[in-house]
Amino acid sequence: MALLEFTKISKHFGGLQVIKDFTFEVNQGEIVSIIGPNGAGKTTVFNLITGIYTPDEGDIRFEGKSLLGLEPHQICQRGIARTFQLLRLFLNMSVRENVMSAAYPRTHSNLAQIIFRTPGFRKEEDRIRTLAEEKLGFFGNRLNGTFDQPVYSLPYANRRQVEMARAMATEPKILLLDEPAAGMNPNETQEITQLIGELRARGGYTILVIEHDMQVVEGISDRVIALDYGEKIAEGTYHDVATNERVIEAYLGRQHATRAK
Amino acid sequence: MSASQLSLSGRMSGVIERWNALPIATRFFGLLVAAATIPFLTSNDYVIRIAGNVCLFAALAVALNVVVGYAGLLDLGFIAFYGIGAYLYAILSSDQFGIHWPSWLTLPFIALLGVVFGLLLGSPSLRLLGDYLAIVTLGFGLVFAQLALTLDRVELPWQEGVVINVTGGTNGIVKLDPLSLFGFQLSNVTHYFYALLIWLGIVLIIVHHLNQSRMGRAWRSMGEDALAAETMGMPTRRLKLLAFSCGAAIAGVTGAIFAAWQQSVFPQNFSTDVLITLYAMMVLGGISNLGGAALGAVVLSVVPELLRSPELARAIFYATLTLGLLLFSKPRRNGPIILISVIILGFLLRWIVQAAAPDLLTPPTIKVAAESISSAFDRASQQFGILVQGWILFLKDPLLPGNIAFVILIPALLGLSRMKAGVLKLILTIPAIYLLIFVWETRFAAEPAVTRLLLVGGLLVVLMIFRPNGLLGKRKIEIV
Amino acid sequence: MEEFLAQLPQQLVNGLTLGSVYALIALGYSMVYGILQLLNFAHGDVYMVGAFIGFGVLTALLPESGPLLPSVFIIIAMLLAAMIGCGLLGVGIEWFAYRPLRNAPRIAPLISALGTSILIQNAIQLTLTANYRVYRTEKIIPLAAGFDIGDAHISATRALVIFSAIIMMIGLTYLVRRTKLGRAMRAVAIDREAAATMGVNVDRIIVLTFFIGSALAGAAGVLTGLVFTRVWHTMGFNAGLKGFTAAVVGGIGNIPGAMLGGMLLGIVEAFAVGFIAPAFKEVITFVVLIIILLIRPRGLLGTTAIQKV
């Protein structure tokens, strides 16, 4: 049984059909990439999985159980975490607090424990703190020393890392990364490719990635799925998809497709 | 850049930073202890009453901070929770219905009901965003005020002819039982001040603990970006309800203590004016800043009181004017220049009018009754007032010119504040300052009640423009 | 039931009169919110100033000897003076109290608005005292004038109010939908930055929006004075609240919504006063408001903005 099953999903907004009869699945331990031109509906897929939108048709199953009708926070509790295309960090909170906040679903202190600062509460706070530092530490030295700074003071690449750490702090089984390499220079892009590989190797996460940068896609993917106008147009290894005629047409236009033939 | 060249606002920020850097326990206990000494420093009940009021409003401002500052919910009906708590206490501890519950029962009960009402208001509001939430909560607050006014004649539909007086209408409910805690009955201002101080301390501790926990982090995350928070596993709907309930519970108990202190409740105690003052206090101090909320309470409770006494008001006005000019003029030397020029202008104008139309002028109207003035300060202030009124164009019929001057003054001040610094601005400031003094002497001093409000309004606007994050607030970024 | 039906037309007329005033005030709120996402709490006080300006003009043109001009012209003069005066006041408020706070956290302009509201109210009290003024409407519009529709008697004054409000709303709708200026206003409301890059002078549009919104409030003030005759310095608070509520009910930021919301609110209030109890009119009005918002959380005509996540 696949970890995540996305079956015959359709979604429209007003008159615009954004996703059409889209089916795919992700298996435990895989790194799968979704590619496609802008507006193809890739982020919408993430929004459907995480419960921000409800599909018009189809089913989404995680570990065999349907996610339809669940609130986003419940879906997160089931073990699905994501990052956002245009970073959505808690800007005025510190780096550490951003990551600690995501540990909420795995914690249990109630109001009384909090107000009276019981030993149970203190122990849990320590655990969350350690967890946050561990997740932030995943990125090596890059974020050292910044833990208490407000997030808005961090440079862009570091912010992306904090957002990933935050997603990891929910202790998920699968990570959804939305354009993790967006806006990065070649060096940073190299790093991200490495990092995503390590996320699986060291962290044991299954990863679903939306990406535009083909170098990254090539470097990380077990499988690639191509989307255009909400429909799946190709699926397979990076090489298969990158040389697929329809994919080339979607990105570069018909001329290039026929030339590639 | 040498220390002497640092601007005043820069120096102020430095002091604030050093204050914020102290460990929080130190700041907390330091202030509490300092406040606790007030009844020992003065036996004036009036002062202690003001101090008590400050604690009252500080507690409310802190509770409001949880709802607005942390959870980001614009609750404009917050005052209703305060009022409900007060009226509940009144109903449970008076002859209104002959119920006289003991305090150790009433207070927790009111806290519990506060939670219930918080949930009641919170639930329908869950679906509403931002400004819609504001209007619904505002409506709730107004409905409460209306009900307090009109529920003095409640007819039971199932019992003919029986009319129950629930809230006492405009007359409120009076002769409430005093609070009685741990066998000790609170009977005078000082007792209630300490009770309120302790309550404020408790509230601060509770809110601080909440803030530094998964609860607080979740609330603040929600306030920053509710969608991201929800996606990261935080149940935003439940959290919103919790924020409402906590705020409501604290406000309710605060209201109960207030009712016991005042020994009565009236609908006017919970009018929109009070709500506005509360919001102003919170914003003044800096949202999401507990110390700031308390500071805001201090400023907005104390300043209007200070302005009540004409002697004190006069002293404050001229002191602020002079200090303001000397300290905030850019460049510094403009300050004395303006001051001296204004004085010269005054003499000039008076000399001209004296020569041309002496009947218009009148001698100063302040009388110094040497025996009845309570302090040297008051007398000195009055002497100074006489001096100024002798210098300025003090007219026999000041009403119309005063009003006209006032109407000219406002756009003049506004325009000046937005002008670019330069010689022209310097020159224009001189008659503007003269006009300001003129209007003060002829109109403001004559109507202190209105002036107080005017100054509060002006203070709010000016403060927001120069420090939009409040006095103690830190720079904030917002996702729009 | 019979009595209800008998009273119905009259209460409808009352409701429409009240609603016209509320709609005009609501328009100002909605327009400003649409472009700045700002709740202009000082708007109610602009309305109040309009009422006073109208009073001033009326008194000036109504010496003991009798009206100096034919009634029509007096009314037009009052409206024009109030609209221009309030328009300028609104522009001034924007320039001083809101513009410096364009990039501040959202609650800062809210507090600034509150402060401005307090300032205006007390400035009026200081200069004109807290006594209420009375419009001597009967001198320019005979009390008996009016006409009957069925069981309802529409006095000339009420007809004037409803008629003027409708004319102004038609004018505004034409402006917003059919003119280049209106298009610019809509563009700024949708996306300020994009409009700026398209060559729209955003600041000027904002100033204009404030001017128009405040002018409408000023007109509402004059009309209120004519019908209800009493004006006083705190009248802006309640009316502003109602106008704000109406704007929200209709869908804040939405111009037809503001008109609809205003009319609806007026009718609800008139019905509450006429059929239930005047004492409970505020309560009833807000209960209705809450019910509407529960059913349609974005207001009657508010659209759900589809956010790109």
Image: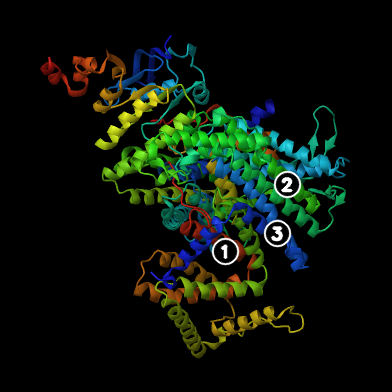
Position above or below: B37 against B319: above
Q: Is residue B204 left or right of residue C295?
A: right
Q: Residues within 10 Å of mark 1 (few under 14, many from 20)?
A: some
Mark 2 chain:
B
Identify the disc placed on residue B455. Answer: 1
Location of mark 3 (residue): B33
Q: Are marks 3 and 1 in contact (CB under 8 Å)?
A: no
Q: Is residue B82 left or right of residue A13?
A: right
Identify the disc placed on residue A151. Answer: none
Q: Residues within 10 Å of mark 2 (few under 14, many from 20)?
A: many
Q: Residues within 10 Å of mark 3 (few under 14, many from 20)?
A: few
Q: Is residue B471 left or right of residue C308?
A: right
Mark 3 chain:
B
Q: Nearer the viewer, residue C23 or B478?
A: B478
> The residue under label 2 is which amino acid type?
Gly
* Sequence-wise first label, 2 or 3: 3
**SS category of the residue bearing label 2:** helix
Q: Which quadrant of the rendered structure holds the C terminus of chain A?
A: top left
Q: Where in the figure is residue A179, as x and y percent of width and height?
A: 33, 29
* Sequence-wise first label, 2 or 1: 2
**SS category of the residue bearing label 3:** helix
Mark 1 chain:
B
Q: Nearer the viewer, mark 2 or mark 3?
A: 3
Q: Where in the figure is residue B14, as x and y percent of width and height?
A: 49, 62
Identify the disc placed on residue B255. Answer: 2
